Amino acid sequence: MSQTLSAQSALQQTRERIWHEWTETIQNSDTFALPQPDSLSKAQTFTWTIPEELEKSAVMQFYYGTKGEKPQDGFPLFVYMHGSGPKMLEWYTGQKLSLQFEDGPSVYAIPRIPNEGELYRWWQKGKQWAWEKLLRRAFASGVVDPERVYFLGISEGGYGAQRLASFYADYLAGAGPMAGGEPLRNAPCENLSNTAFSLITGEMDYMFRRREMTENTSRTLDSLATLYPGEYTHRVELQTGRGHGIDYTSTTPWLSRYRRDAQPTQFRWENYEMDGVKRNSFYNIEVIEEGEAYRTYYDVRIKDNEVDISIQDVEYETTFTDPNWNIPFYFARHLTESKSGKLRVYLSEKLVRLDKNVTVRVNGKKVFKGKMKMEQASIESTMRQSLKLWGDPLRIFPACVEVEIGK
């Protein structure tokens, strides 16, 4: 799937120039640019204020620092989310634990939850704003290796890490929730097709069915790994004799072994709301117009200049709600073929031969066949468009095609 070397070189030069312009803009004019990190042991901090319309009186403070010397490609970034005790104590404990983890060289961003009570959730929309700022600013900083970003957390942070792993899987090399275990409607495992996933829970951690939900996640990922060999890298462990307090030390060394494939030729994505917010973009597809479904499931496969996309509407039927906590834990998932909507599919020289015809099919129906627009003005426009969408140096696409579902 390669073009001539000269064509590839020209695309890469344009990509690098546009990325350089992007990073300069962020570093010179954005009040949310990241500071240069010092040693994590010195407890360097920075502070972001979340917009009032997303969460009132929400100030999110971060420990931010490094362990070891910076590698040539940048530090792996670990984002650690603390548990639900008193936030100052939990925040400090997170820094102390992170210093103990054997994952250097690395850089850590350790946020403090802005508010407590009902707002003590790492996946709420105010915190989503912060994660998206953090990912884009980390990539633009020159400090972080964009192939090596990991989310992890303990207890409430474990729930957060599992939900965010599914929601932001296309940005992550891996995720490591600990002492958690989510009902899978909240964190569809299908989205983890190219994200290494570690989940560790105590075998006697029964509160909120954490052990049971961990086992359910394990079964689901095992099944997906069988269906799609090589795509669902995971390990799920129940620590013998442990309750809610477990040994956390194996998570980041295991995650460190994995890098992100930002442009996979196969992936699956359930597009869903988290605290009322949808991503509407994932890997190389962007939803321009939604269909009628509350959730939509995409299965994307790219091979030999052919892009096949299966699109289905998703409905969940609750099959068990725990009466003690009034929390739905188990669901039946129903899929039906989508009949409407519009997508933008971004393509690169890694995914297809851009000098040859590309065929796109949706639910088995051919919706496009032809060559990509590859004039310089079109290339630059599409690169800037994809960069604005993801803020990701590994997803600066030179070509795209719009397709309608059901047309």
Image (cartoon, rainbow, N blue to C red):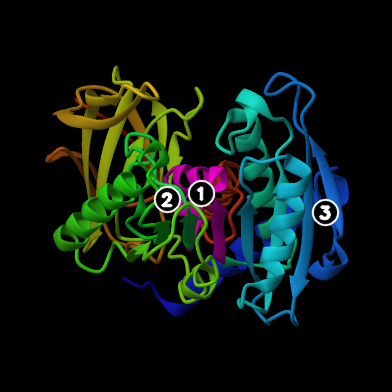
- Give me the C-alpha separation between circle 2 and circle 3: 25 Å
- Work out whether residue 12 can be spotted: yes
Identify whether 174 is placed above or below 184: below
Residue at disc 2, secondary structure: loop
- Work out whether residue 358 can be spotted: no
Give the labeled residue for mark 3: 27
**Which residue is painted at 73% across and 66% down in the image?**
142
The tag earlier along the polypeptide, 2 or 3, is 3
Identify whether 136 is placed above or below 362: below
**Left or right of 299: which side holds 126?**
right
**Which residue is painted at 34% across and 49% down in the image?**
211
Residue 126, located in which quarter of the rendered image?
Answer: top right
Residue 153 covered by magenta stretch? yes
Q: Which mark is residue 283?
A: 2
Across and down, in percent, residue 342 comes to 34, 28
Frontmost of labels 3 and 1 is: 1
Camera-side residue of 156 and 339:
156
Residue 385 covered by magenta stretch? no
**Callout 3: few (<14), some (14-19), or many (20+) C-alpha neighbours within 10 Å?**
some
Give amino acid for label 1: Gly
What range of the chain is rendered magenta?
Answer: 148-173
**Left or right of 48: which side holds 228?**
left
Q: Which mark is residue 158?
A: 1
**Which residue is painted at 53% across and 61% down in the image?**
394
Callout 3–callout 1 Cβ contact below 8 Å: no
